[in-house]
Amino acid sequence: DGGITQSPKYLFRKEGQNVTLSCEQNLNHDAMYWYRQDPGQGLRLIYYSQIVNDFQKGDIAEGYSVSREKKESFPLTVTSAQKNPTAFYLCASSFGRQGRETQYFGPGTRLLVL
Amino acid sequence: GNSVTQMEGPVTLSEEAFLTINCTYTATGYPSLFWYVQYPGEGLQLLLKATKADDKGSNKGFEATYRKETTSFHLEKGSVQVSDSAVYFCALGQGYNQGGKLIFGQGTELSVKP
């Protein structure tokens, strides 16, 4: 089955700790995206990548970092510089980059601060 | 800049009632428009989309028509079911120069009572 997987489902972060959220897709999509969702709000874009070895900041990139070494993988690191990391994180991918294509979403990772 | 505005929720309806969720947008050019649905604790799924003016997207009894003259993309369903209870997001697709990013409305929570 083709799709997007995210792991873990729940993640706990201690003060001063960096944590990495995994996102993998087997849809052969070029573009991948990371969104943050807070309760009662829409999704806000953190980072996106249109092609391997290239990525751009979204609207709320501060305190986050990404890499895109393989087409199918786009991990997100939440660094200690992100002071309010508690949120639901969603990864998405799309075949094209024109804005007309459907974005397919993973099941999400819920990050909580201890 | 581009933006999407949705009617605020929560919306509570009885089973078999008619549903309308309003969505208006501000954008330059001719963006694609989307409705996504999110069930509790899950990622987003595409419900329907339209890529040009006067297009009607439809799926699972839901419909929305791309109205350029009123910059709207309202979601409708003639008879809702309890299983339609979810959060609905209207989104606008931006072009290649902006990475094909989606801009989301804040979401509208729908609760359908038996």
Image (cartoon, coloured by chain):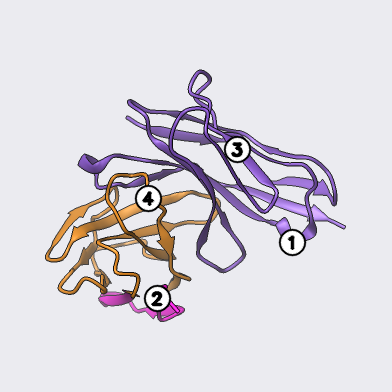
Chain colours: A orange, B purple
Question: Where is residue A98 shown, x and y percent of the image?
Answer: 29, 45
Would you place residue A53 above or below residue B68 in this image?
Answer: below
Q: How crowded is mark 1: few (under 14 residues within 10 Å), some or many (20 or more)?
A: few
Determine which quarter of the picture holds residue B22.
Answer: top right
Q: Name the residue under label 4.
A: A101
Q: Which mark is residue B42?
A: none
Q: What residue type is labelled 1?
A: Ser
Q: Which of marks 2 and 4 is in front?
A: 4
| C-alpha gap between disc 4 and disc 1 | 27 Å
Q: What residue type is labelled 3?
A: Ala
Left or right: B68, with A62 as reference point: right
Q: Name the residue under label 2.
A: A6
| C-alpha gap between disc 2 and disc 4 | 21 Å
Q: Name the residue under label 3.
A: B64
Q: Residue B83 carries which label?
A: 1
**Could you tell me if the residues under marks 4 and 1 are in contact, i.e. CB atoms within 8 Å?**
no
| C-alpha gap between disc 3 and disc 1 | 19 Å
